[in-house]
Image (spheres, helix red, strand yellow):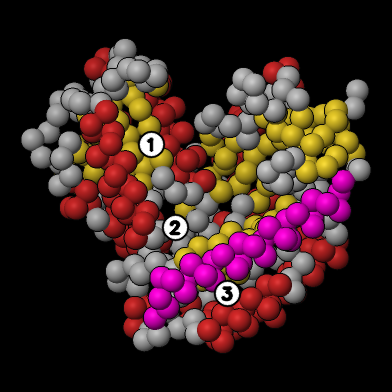
Amino acid sequence: MIDTTVFQNKTAVYYTLGCKLNFSETSTIGKILREAGVRTVRKGEKADICVVNTCSVTEMADKKCRQAIHRLVKQHPGAFVVVTGCYAQLKPGDVAKIDGVDVVLGAEQKGELLQYLGDLQKHEKGEAITTPTKDIRSFSPSCSRGDRTRFFLKVQDGCDYFCSYCTIPFARGRSRNGTIASMVEQARQAAAEGGKEIVLTGVNIGDFGKTTGESFFDLVKALDQVDGIERYRISSIEPNLLTDETIEFVSHSRSFMPHFHIPLQSGCDEVLQLMRRRYDTALFVSKVKKIKEVMPDAFIGVDVIVGTRGETPEYFEQAYQFIDGLDVTQLHVFSYSERPGTQALKIEYVVSPEEKHQRSQRLLALSDQKTQAFYARHIGQTMPVLMEKSKAGVPMHGFTENYIRVEVESDDSLDNQVVHVRLGEFNEEMIALKGTILV
């Protein structure tokens, strides 16, 4: 039994780097600490506890983690500093040596953070507490709102794919998940707290069910029955795990939105093989066509990595032309980053930083063209929009079912409300459509 009296009236600050899954988990950590008596630090206050949830998807992510830790240690002198997340799991010794860090927690310990805080007395040197990746077994549930309108429901963790460029399986362990029954219960709780939209998150969510004998499709069908939740969005799902039956179900479901995010990584089959991806461009095309066949106005986001080892100029050009011909809405473009211990380091051909940058810029420009064309097709239509609270003096925004960002005049009474909006022209930044609310 943990004695929580030491946490009464203490304050904490949280800093998260990386993916939506990390933000969801940080929010859950915050909830655990709040229930123990810790409140979130107010502006200008010095925190008693600093929690940093790290990312390690690129070398730059590692650097940002170190900078964030140094900054928080300086801003909150004397605070008890806890570092967790992917960088903490991969490099616990390095993180523990950073001045001011007290405890480093691995993937297995993250959900039990409270028991590692002790009496909040600073350590002479950082202590690293991790479990070897091969032994990581626990699934820590997380369904959290944070400061956003939408909730993020963690349905799966870990990955069994071991793509040649990626360290995530080493940072988060093998694929595992909770039960459908537990997911449904968390969704019901989110609805009870006023949540209207839930994003399903995880590392490889299409792999859901490996540890429980269930399936992602079964999960989707069960969640669709939860009263009170009006919208679900499926976050990144591997194309080979996005089944036609799931696509068909989303097309006529009560609450799953016509919005998909599918990692492509490269539009060149030779590069996909070097990456050890589990599909080819033909399969990817078939998934996009299937979605558009049953949901012509669906939003499709796509992840692409540029400059991976082995991506010659010819291979990149082939990939660019392939992506140009895809009926997708938006590209999330990442520059390849060398990660220690990955198989990609054995590939001889190396792309220069300058060439990576040029390729990124070309794809980002292509993304803007595709997104703006998608938005433009909807100008003049009336669509339901879930509004999100805005800062004072700033227009409110919200999203249509197919994830078009809409901007309207600020009205706090509309926060977390679904309203019908007539979509007008682009805003000045060309990143949203101006809307008129219909009474």
Vertical side of 82 occupied by 291: above or below = below
* Residue linked to disc 3: 266
Residue, far top: 9
Start-end of magenta stretch = 350-379
Q: Residue at x 61, y 81 (%)?
A: 317
Amino acid beneath label 1: Tyr
- Near-viewer residue (134 or 416): 416
Vertical side of 168 occupied by 383: above or below = above
Displayed quadrant of residue 418: top right
- Tags 3 and 1 touching, CB below 8 Å: no
427 to the left or right of 204: right
Where is residue 383? Give x, y as percent: 86, 39
* Residue linked to disc 2: 158
Disc 1 secondary structure class: strand
Q: Earlier in the sequence, mark 2 or mark 3?
A: 2
Q: Residue at x 57, y 74 (%)?
A: 266
Amino acid beneath label 3: Ser
What quarter of the picture does the C terminus occupy? Answer: top right
Is residue 353 on the magenta stretch? yes
Mark 3 crowdedness (10 Å alpha carbons): few <14, some 14-19, many ≥20:
many
- What is the distance, in whole Å, between disc 2 and disc 3 at their CAs? 22 Å
Where is residue 178? Give x, y as percent: 51, 48
Displayed quadrant of residue 99: top left
Amino acid beneath label 2: Gly
* Residue linked to disc 1: 15
153 to the left or right of 59: right
- What is the distance, in whole Å, between disc 2 and disc 1 at their CAs? 22 Å
Q: Residue at x 54, y 29 (%)?
A: 147
Displayed quadrant of residue 45: top left
Is residue 140 shown to the viewer in this render? no
